[in-house]
Amino acid sequence: MTSARTTSRSRSATREKLFQAAVTLIAEQGFSSTTVEEIAERAGVAKGTVYYNFASKTELFEELLRHGVELLSADLRHAAEGTAERDGTKVDALDAMIRAGLMFIDRYPAFTQLYVAELWRTNRAWNDTLLVVRQEAVAVVEGVLREGVAAGELSEEIDIQLTAAALVGMVLVAALDWKAFQPERSLEDVHGALSLLLQGRVGGRGRPR
Amino acid sequence: MTSARTTSRSRSATREKLFQAAVTLIAEQGFSSTTVEEIAERAGVAKGTVYYNFASKTELFEELLRHGVELLSADLRHAAEGTAERDGTKVDALDAMIRAGLMFIDRYPAFTQLYVAELWRTNRAWNDTLLVVRQEAVAVVEGVLREGVAAGELSEEIDIQLTAAALVGMVLVAALDWKAFQPERSLEDVHGALSLLLQGRVGGRGRPR
DNA sequence: TACTTTGGACTGACCGGTCAGTCCAAAGAA
DNA sequence: TTCTTTGGACTGACCGGTCAGTCCAAAGTA
């Protein structure tokens, strides 16, 4: 919201608690089967406090989305820049972003679940918010792909948008499956599997590093 | 379903109409914000009819899930078998399955949306159904990967489960993005982008076919 | 032919419960 | 004083599920 400047310390602490509570509940149950009362209870505040801090249940959720995606795209950008400073290739940058994506999902699995569950729905109240927010994250990946093609490092054949979507999907689904169905695996395992795929070494004609 | 013998023609026609109505509404709005009345209305029947044909809203949804995934896994299996008959490689089989997946999503986008939105939620009433249903679809992909490794065609390094999840995610997300954000693209475009990725030719060291 | 019966499919008003959002007096906190 | 939170009572809309009753084609009956 625009009045962050005038938000007191205690108030933003309360808002943070509400975000925390809301994100897990909504990931588990979905937006509309999660009640405001539940959110308040888990955050340890009164229901009135929710409405003192947010105009409505929907607005609480929209701010949650914005907040979460900001964290993600910052992480991605940071990962890509990190390899650039170390003179890495663009494939290295993509690989680092995959890792950053996995780490993000590892840290905020609930947010990821909720994001995936909402992204492709039409007719939701927060349509516009979600569109903006998605663009912000995807743009980072597309940017790196574009640079890779420009530098002649990636094939000119590739379709930037579709490839970016596919890469995101690869990471997203592999990570969610990891968390949901084989949580005992390490992040390295998952990262390894995705790296292999990114570098096209699944086909077995693998050049050993 | 098992009672096909005792289900009259008109009754199963009604059930079909209800499936149709439910799948799009739930894809748009989610399970719990879709009312039984809406479903009935769109199907052109009375609310009571829904409860005459299904025990509950949840059961209607569970049957819908089972029905949809049966269609999908049949398509995938069929695609894989098709290449086997033509002496294709396992990579060809994977490619054919990607295409089959895209065609499925093209035909039933609403079902796909709804499936993705529900799959990684915890605490849902239809948890068991979804688990079974997921396994059925993923198993087809894992099977082909396993055969590919056994035949020495795919690298032994690969992790079957994670790679299968990643491939599914690639197709899923690319296709949903296609439908949601660039519906004017052709299926061939999308398939081409994914093929490139599968065959590891994104890196630009592309071996022309 | 003229009637009655049967049972499956469907209807829609209704009930009981739930929930977002409102309101407010009083208490902390800064 | 001003901002923030509390706690809980209340409202009104909405919704899943129920149920008594309608409809009708087919089968039986005389």
Image (spheres, coloured by chain):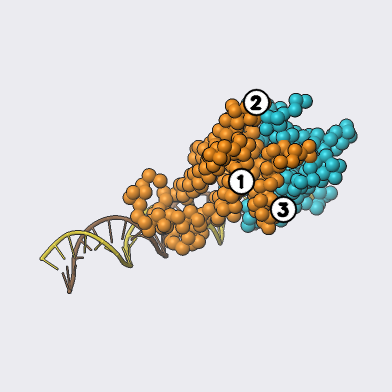
Chain colours: A cyan, B orange, C brown, D yellow
Q: Write down the chain letter for disc 3.
A: A
- Whether discs 3 and 2 lie on one chain: the answer is no
Q: What is the spatial separation of the Cα atoms under label 3 and label 1, in whole angstroms?
A: 27 Å
Q: Secondary structure at mark 1?
A: helix
Horizontal side of residue A165 vs A91, given as left or right: left
Please name whichever residue, A30 or D10, is drawn nearer the observer in this view of the structure.
A30
Q: Residue at x 46, y 63 (%)?
A: B44
Up-down relation of residue C18 to residue B132 (above or below)? below
Q: Residues within 10 Å of mark 3 (few under 14, many from 20)?
A: few
Residue that appears at 49% across and 40% down: B129
Relative image position of residue B133 (x, y in whole percent): 51, 40
What residue is shown with label 2?
B156
> Where residue B43 sits: x, y (%)?
47, 60
Marks 2 and 1, how far apart in space? 25 Å
Res. A18 visible in picture: no
Pointers 3 and 2 in contact (C-beta within 8 Å): no
Where does the image place residue B28, in percent across and percent down from the top left?
59, 54
Disc 3 or disc 2, which is closer to the eye? 2
Q: Which mark is residue B99?
A: 1
Residue at figure coordinates x 75%, y 48% from the top left: A159
- Residue type at mark 1 is Arg
* Label 2 crowd (10 A; few <14 / some 14-19 / many >=20): some
Chain ID of residue with mark 1: B
Which of the two labelled residues, at mark 2 and mark 1, occupies the earlier sequence position?
1
Callout 2: chain: B
Residue with the mark numbered 3: A131
Q: Residue A91 shows which numbered tag?
A: none
